[in-house]
Image (spheres, grey):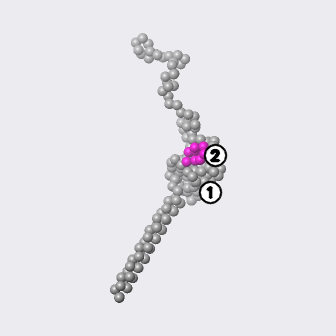
Amino acid sequence: MKDKTGRPVYAPVWQRNYHDLEKRAPHYPPATVSYIYSGQFRVSSKSASFTLSGEMVVLVDASACDITLTLPSAADYLHKVYTIKKVDSSGHSITIEGDVGDETIDGEVSVSFNLQYQYVTIICDSLDWHIIGGEYVKMENLLEQQLDILEQIRRNTKNTVTQLETASDEETEEGED
């Protein structure tokens, strides 16, 4: 409200018009912000196997043993986001698996990692879980690809050497005739 000169005047709450403010404020469906908790992340620290629920960030200390984290049912956690990080330097691994056998994480039944500070951020679409960030590389797949490439190079090299030896033997035989 303004007075006759155009300067703002204090108006009690019941006299203010909030309709304009409501039109300008962004509207977010409740499910899209289900992981926000008073503007802060809910962080928990774990050192034993457990099933995830209300946590958002889970710091896992696997220094004593391997730890398995079970995700909740995907059907009940649409848009839920978890970030899981290994904080210890031991050789023990962290395995993240779906609630039931048909729920996957990027098409895999489980995801495992064992390097300190390695982490993964996953989100649920109500059917499966999807990796959307983190420092997680499927090393087995990467190593298998590299081994396949090396094996192909080895075969090509062996074939080339065999061809060169055969050509050299033919030249030697032609020279003796």
Which residue does the numbered mark 1 point to in the structure image? 65
Numbered disc 1: secondary structure? loop
Give the left or right position of residue 92, taking residue 156 as reference: right
Mark 1 is surrounded, within 10 Å at the Cα level, by few (under 14), some (14 to 19) or many (20 or more) other residues, namely some
Numbered disc 2: secondary structure? loop
Point out residue 19 in the picture as x, y percentages from the top left corner: 51, 22
Considering every residue shown, the one lying at the far top of the view is 4
Q: Amino acid at mark 1?
A: Cys
Q: Which quadrant does the C terminus fall into?
A: bottom left
Q: Nearer the viewer, residue 127 or 54?
A: 127
Instruction: Tell me, yes or no, if residue 49 can be seen here.
Output: no
Distance from Cα at disc 1 to Cα at disc 2:
22 Å
Residue at image position (48%, 27%) is: 24
Q: Quadrant of residue 55?
A: top right
Q: Please determine whether, in this image, residue 50 is positioned above or below residue 35.
A: below
Marked residue nearer the N-terminal end (1 or 2) = 1
Instruction: Tell me, yes or no, if residue 156 can be seen here.
Output: yes
Q: Amino acid at mark 2?
A: Pro
Residue 163, numbered circle: none
Point out residue 44 in the picture as x, y percentages from the top left corner: 59, 45
Q: Which circle, 1 or 2, is nearer the viewer? A: 2
Residue 72, numbered circle: 2
Residue at image position (58%, 43%) is: 125
